[in-house]
Amino acid sequence: MQNVLTKDMEVNFRWLSDQPIVDSFTLNDLFDETALDQHLSRLMSEFGSPTRAHAASITAKRLGYAAALMIYARIKHRVCINPSECLFLTITEESTNASWLPVYSFPLKTAEIFQDTVEWITKDIYAKTLVPLVELLAQEKGISRVVLFENIFTYIKWMFITKLQDIHTFQQLMNIPAEKYGVKKQHPLAIYETGHTDLRKTCCLYYQTSGAVKPCKTCPL
């Protein structure tokens, strides 16, 4: 069973079981002001970000992918996950020409799950992890919470609709009040869901990346 789980995560997603000796940090590390500053500065100096706002936006996209992987592992394989343990591994050769493109790793511990999945996503993934990180990233001039949350939403929707084909849980998340996610006003998921198109409402700024050949397929500009 563990081999099936590991193979699924490695073959179908940017996940590694064997962690190579490369630059790495956890989601929890980003809560440290100095570590976050160093991370954004590195995106500008090494990985093609022209501004800190762009670096913050790209970081939110990678946070969204990490969250999507954790959700997949939990629903598909019943893995018990502490979001703060999710590890970002930067392989320089793969990242230099495509902004910052990490691989991910977190413990694949399967056990009986007592917490409801919807509650886990709203409380542990969003309220305790993603929302506070978005607040930190939104302090950068030139980027808004609306863009940052849509960067995350894009991957969450992709995982539920395309990979898990779990429309029921996705709809449940749409109907949960915004305050359950740790936000006071704009719902971090429902505000973006139209049901008619995959076209984004905001631009993630990827087109500004040094070396970018073309914008995202879903760019609204």
Image (cartoon, rainbow, N blue to C red):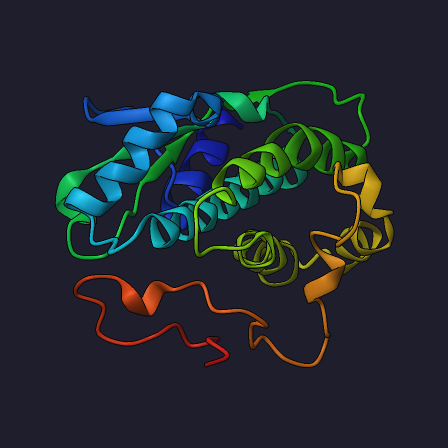
Q: Is residue 47 above or below residue 42?
A: below
Q: Who is closer to the viewer here, 67 or 74?
A: 67
Give x and y (percent) for residue 204: 44, 63
Q: Residue at x 28, y 24 (%)?
A: 19
Give x and y (percent) for residue 145: 59, 51
Q: Residue furthest front?
A: 141
Q: Residue at x 29, y 53 (%)?
A: 51
Give x and y (percent) for residue 75: 67, 39
Q: Is residue 77 above or below residue 23?
A: below
Quarter of the view holding residue 72: top right
Looking at the image, residue 154 sits to the left or right of residue 167; the answer is left
Quarter of the view holding residue 9: top left
Quarter of the view holding residue 78: top right
Quadrant for the C terminus in the image: bottom left
Q: Who is closer to the viewer here, 170 or 6?
A: 170
Give x and y (percent) for residue 147: 54, 59
Looking at the image, residue 5 sits to the left or right of residue 14; the answer is right
Q: Who is closer to the viewer here, 127 or 158?
A: 127
Q: Who is closer to the viewer here, 99 or 158?
A: 99
Q: Is residue 187 visible?
A: yes
Q: Is residue 200 above or below residue 40?
A: below
Looking at the image, residue 29 sits to the left or right of residue 80; the answer is left
Q: Residue at x 67, y 37 (%)?
A: 126
Q: Is residue 18 visible?
A: no
Q: Residue at x 54, y 69 (%)?
A: 202
